Structures are given as structure tokens and as C-alpha cells.
Image (cartoon, helix red, strand yellow):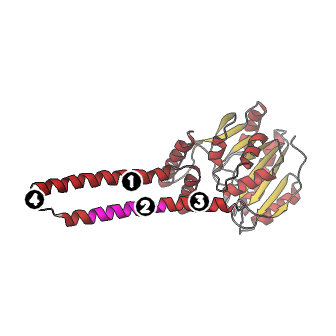
Amino acid sequence: MLSVVIPAYNEAGSIGRAAECIGRVLRDAEIPYELIFVDDGSSDGSWDEITQTAEQDSAVRGVGFSRNFGKEAAIFAGMEAAGGACCAVMDCDLQHPPEKLPEMYALWRQGWEVVNGVKSDRGRESSLHGFAARTFYKIMGKAVRIDMSRASDFKLMDRRVVDTLLGLSERKTFFRALTAWVGFKTAEVEFSVAERTAGETHWSTMSLIRYAVSNIASYSSAPMQIVTVLGVVTLLLSLVLGVQTLVNWASGGAADGFTTVIILMLLIGSVLMISLGIIGYYISQIFIEVKGRPRYLVAKVCGKERGGQA
């Protein structure tokens, strides 16, 4: 059986359509399936839509959080609830085309343990958003040593991969990077990003920046190296200015040092504040991890579990 995990945050207008479209594709392909919608603390009636859809369709199940915990937590909650021998993750807005699921399922049947949906294009987006996304994935790609320029959350995984991911103890997770990090036998399926079927994106520029910073810090120590680089650059600049001051002193020239001192103080102060900010952010991540709180809290469930890992 194929379990399809569908995170949903304020997607009341998309849930019924997503269940219908995904279900039709999988039934036509004669693939046994279950759909697991995870309500990530929505405030627009998404849970009511999930429960209503589950009453109408026995293949639909719902998991509801006590509050908003984020998409990464919703993905992991869905995988934990999944009962299939393989598990797919896709967006509720159908920007991940359900028509690709039979192709991904067929590759899994052939022995591939992770089938990644990779973007053949990024769809319609602003130039600023596109630049920011490319920069983010370039950084993350270097961290995991895998090309993530076309990465997405649209994936199909074998049960062994799902259990491995669920066994990781870290609280701050980045699903796309972790599926690359765990390895296993991997194949790719290209897809074009479709237009949203309903509603508007919930990702503002600031939320994307916070998402990027959080994931980079949780997965890579590269920003910590920036502190070292800034320190070396400041040291070299100080040495150059120091040599210049000594040369002026030895030649009897008056050292006009006030401007230089002010510039150096501003430069060093800025470097120190940036360095403390980076270190402080990593300490806050450590603080979150050592508390050991769960990734999410489930407040409600609906629908009936389907049998086994067929």
C-alpha cells in the first residue's frame, strides 16, 4: 500500500480537491493507497474539511496538531502515521502533480528506495524569490554534498527509509536534506510546478528567510566558519594599518590616527556583533535540542487505519 502524506496549513479550499485528484489517479493506476492529511494548526476550517472528506472517503485519514508546528513537523507526523510499505509526500495545493505518483510507485517496485521529484522548472515566481531560492539551495547543496538546485518535498520513500528518518533524534529537521543525507538507492522523476488550484501561497519573503536560516543552521555549520573568516580579514586589515602607522612614525610624519581609529572601532565592533549573533543563534538551536521536546503535539485524528504494509 502507498501512503500519501499531505501537510495542510490553511488549505481548506484545496483539501477536497486534492483528495479527489490524488485518489482518482491512484485508483486508475490500481495502486492501493491511503491519504493522510496533516493539519498544521490551521485557522481557516481545514480540519473540518479533512474530517468531512474522511467521512466521505474511507481512504482518507487526518492528523491535527494542537498548534502550528511547521511543515517539517507535519511531514514527520504524517510519516509516523503512515501504514504503507512505501510513503509519498506532496503538497496539498497540487503544485506537485499527482499524475507522477504511478511513475514513482513503479520505480519503487523496481527496487529504488527513494524516488525524488525534481523540478524541471520553478513555475511562476519573482526574480528576487528565484535568486534567494537558488542561493539557499547552493548553500545547502554544499552542506550535503548533493545538488539540491531542483530539490522539492515531493518524494516517494520505501518503508526502510521512512523508519530511518523517524529514528533520527534531532528536533529541528530539514526533510529535503535529510532524505539526501540518509542515502539509499535513489532515482529521480522530473515534474513541472503547477499553478495553485485554490488560495494563495502562505510563504512570505520573511517567512522564507526564516525558513532558510533555520534549516541552514540546523543542518550546516558553515555560518560558524564566517566568524573565523571575518576574524582573519579584520586581523589582516589591522596588520596593514599597523604597518602603515609604524612607517609614518619612523619617517617622522604626523599620524592622523583619529579617522583610522574610528573606522577600526566601527569595523571591529560590527564583526564582533555579527559573530556574536551567529554564535548566539547556534546556541539557541542547541538549547532547543537539549530540552528534548517533541517535534509536534497531536490533538486529534480522524479516519480509519487501513490494513498493513501491503
Tell me which numbered mark, 2 or 4, is placed earlier along the sequence. Answer: 4
Q: Nearer the viewer, mark 4 or mark 3?
A: 4
Per the model, the C-alpha gap separating discs 3 and 1 is 22 Å
Relative to 295, 231 lies left or right? left
Mark 2 is on which residue type?
A: Ile
Mark 4 is on which residue type?
A: Gly
Q: Which residue is mark 4?
A: 253
Q: Which residue is mark 3?
A: 285
Was residue 266 drawn as part of the magenta stretch in this picture? yes
The magenta stretch is 262-277
Q: Residue at x 76, y 30 (%)?
A: 110
Q: Secondary structure at mark 2?
A: helix
Relative to 135, 239 lies left or right? left
Tell me which numbered mark, 3 or 2, is placed earlier along the sequence. Answer: 2
Is any part of residue 197 visible from this angle? Answer: no
Q: Secondary structure at mark 3?
A: helix
